[in-house]
Image (cartoon, rainbow, N blue to C red):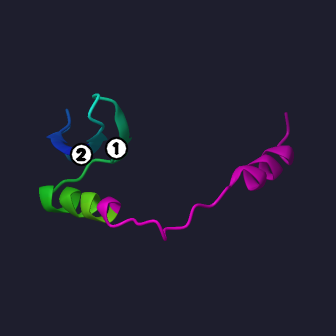
């Protein structure tokens, strides 16, 4: 896998994580004005470990949706 840094059409820095077969499995979802800020975002993702919590939010989302008018 590799992280790719690039500038978007607005001139902001973005990153994406690409697998060896070319699929993008994650991206920055926001543009960064400075390259260093974008690199910091990559470092945060790289810093996640097996101890990082995974939280199932599906029940909370379903309960929230149930209270909305149709």
Residue at (27%, 47%) from the top-left corner?
Answer: 31
8 and 56: which is toward the camera = 56
Q: Is residue 67 magenta?
A: yes
Q: Position of residue 10 (x, y in %)?
A: 20, 37
Count residues near mark 1 (Cα–Cα under 10 Å), then give few for <14, some for 14-19, many for 20+: some
Marks 2/1: CA distance?
8 Å
Count residues near mark 2 (Cα–Cα under 10 Å), then give few for <14, some for 14-19, many for 20+: many
Residue at (33%, 67%) from the top-left corner?
Answer: 47
Residue stretch in magenta: 45-70
Label 2 SS: strand
Q: Which-is-in-front pick, marks 2 and 1?
A: 1
Q: Visible in this render: residue 11?
A: no
Q: Is residue 49 magenta?
A: yes
- Mark 2 vs 1: CB contact within 8 A: yes
Q: Position of residue 24 (x, y in %)?
A: 34, 34
- Looking at the image, is 27 positioned above or below residue 43? above
Could you tell which of marks 2 and 1 lies nearer the N-terminus? Answer: 2
- Residue to which mark 2 is pinned: 14
Residue 39 is left or right of residue 56, and the answer is: left
50 and 33: which is toward the camera = 50
- Looking at the image, is 70 positioned above or below residue 26? above
- Looking at the image, is 24 positioned above or below residue 5? above
Q: Quadrant of the rendered structure where residue 23 is?
A: top left
Q: Quadrant of the rendered structure where residue 49 is?
A: bottom left
Residue 49 is left or right of residue 42, and the answer is: right
Q: Position of residue 26 (x, y in %)?
A: 37, 43
- Residue to which mark 1 is pinned: 27
Residue 62 is left or right of residue 49, and the answer is: right
Q: In which quadrant of the rendered image does the N terminus lie?
A: top left
Residue at (39%, 65%) from the top-left corner?
Answer: 48
């Amino acid at each position: 896998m590799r992280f790719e840094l690039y500038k978007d059409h607005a001139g902001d820095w973005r990153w994406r994580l690409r697998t060896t077969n070319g699929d993008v499995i994650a991206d920055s979802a926001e543009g960064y004005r400075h390259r260093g800020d974008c690199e910091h975002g990559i470092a945060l993702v790289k810093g996640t470990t097996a101890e990082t919590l995974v939280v199932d939010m599906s029940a909370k989302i379903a309960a929230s949706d149930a209270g909305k008018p149709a």
